[in-house]
Amino acid sequence: MPKKARAYWKGYLRLSLVSIGVEIYNAVESKSEISFRQIHKPSGRRVNYEKVVQGLGKIDSADIVKGYEVDTDTYITLEPEEIDALKLESKKTIDLVQFVDTKEIDYRYFERPYFITPADKFAGEGYVVIRDALQKTGKVGLAQVTIGGREWLVAIAPMQDGLVMELLRYAEELRDPADFFDEVPNAKPDKEMIELAVQLIAQKSSKFAPEKYEDHFQTALHELVQAKLKGRKIIAPAEEPRPKGANVVDLMEALKKSVGRSGKGPPKPKSPKTKKRA
């Protein structure tokens, strides 16, 4: 089947002494229909940005290099060829060095998914072996790969007929939850209220179906743009309405009403079958 995009990365996927050629493709795409530009309100013209240096004025893009600040207004400049000369194996090889259960990875680590495909027909057999082995063991492979100017930690897992690679954040990038949850009350809530909340969750539980959801903000923006094109004057409300449930005074009563309004309760557990004695 012809691919709909150019490969984002080309190299090798390695499992011990087995290396196969692979290509990586972006697994997501933006579906936003409306994007904004900065406009000069008095003239209605788009704002343009020029690259300037203080005291020198406008400069050419060709004269711009990357620089690392080592002190105030003191930089070490790096040429593109110097960065390219960095000898990192992960620039061309995704080396599967560890395997873990998927549930062991905190969802905060996940950044962005990519599809991994065989680079050619010669890589197909090894690709399928790795995919099927991951499916059979229920594991995901951890590796590192250099993409977009940085080395990423990645998790590789089977998906349908192929492999998906998820970019992961490093542990040092995650903030400590304790810094944000220190004001959460320590007192245990009423047991009945927890049971009501559990019942409410059970009533609203179903299989994950993301296609049922839409970007309401984009839809509303599109309608706003169409209204403005027709010359309608938009007047913002004086005060944003409070969301439903924001004025809860009696939490117990609110939970009971919510459970009753959501329909029938959770399915009753089946009574265990007694084994007949021989």
Image (cartoon, rainbow, N blue to C red):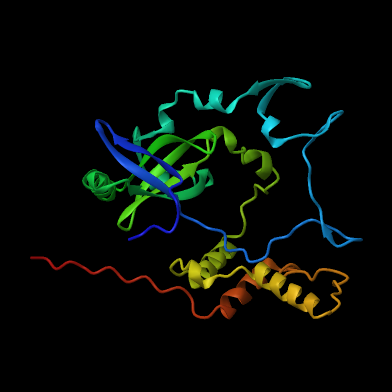
From the viewer's perspective, is residue 26 above or below residue 195?
above
Residue drawn where x is 69% and y is 61% of the image: 35
At horizontal 17% and vertical 66% (from top left) the residue drawn is 275
Q: Nearer the viewer, residue 57 or 33?
A: 57
Q: Position of residue 143 (x, y in %)?
A: 40, 35
**In the depicted view, which residue is nearer to us: 222 or 55?**
55
- Of all residues, the one furthest to the right in this rendering is 42
Is residue 219 in view from this perspective?
yes
**Closer to us: 274 or 113:** 113
Residue 259 in picture, x, y percent from top left: 57, 75
Q: 252 or 35: nearer the eye?
A: 35
The residue drawn where x is 46% and y is 68% is: 209
- Say whether residue 195 is left or right of residue 267: right
Residue 244 visible, this orientation: no
How far across and how far down the image is residue 51, in percent? 77, 38
Picture residue at 81% right of the left edge, 68% below the top:
240
In terms of image quadrants, where is residue 243? Answer: bottom right
Q: Is residue 169 above or below residue 48?
A: above
Look at the picture and state if 255 lies above or below 82. below
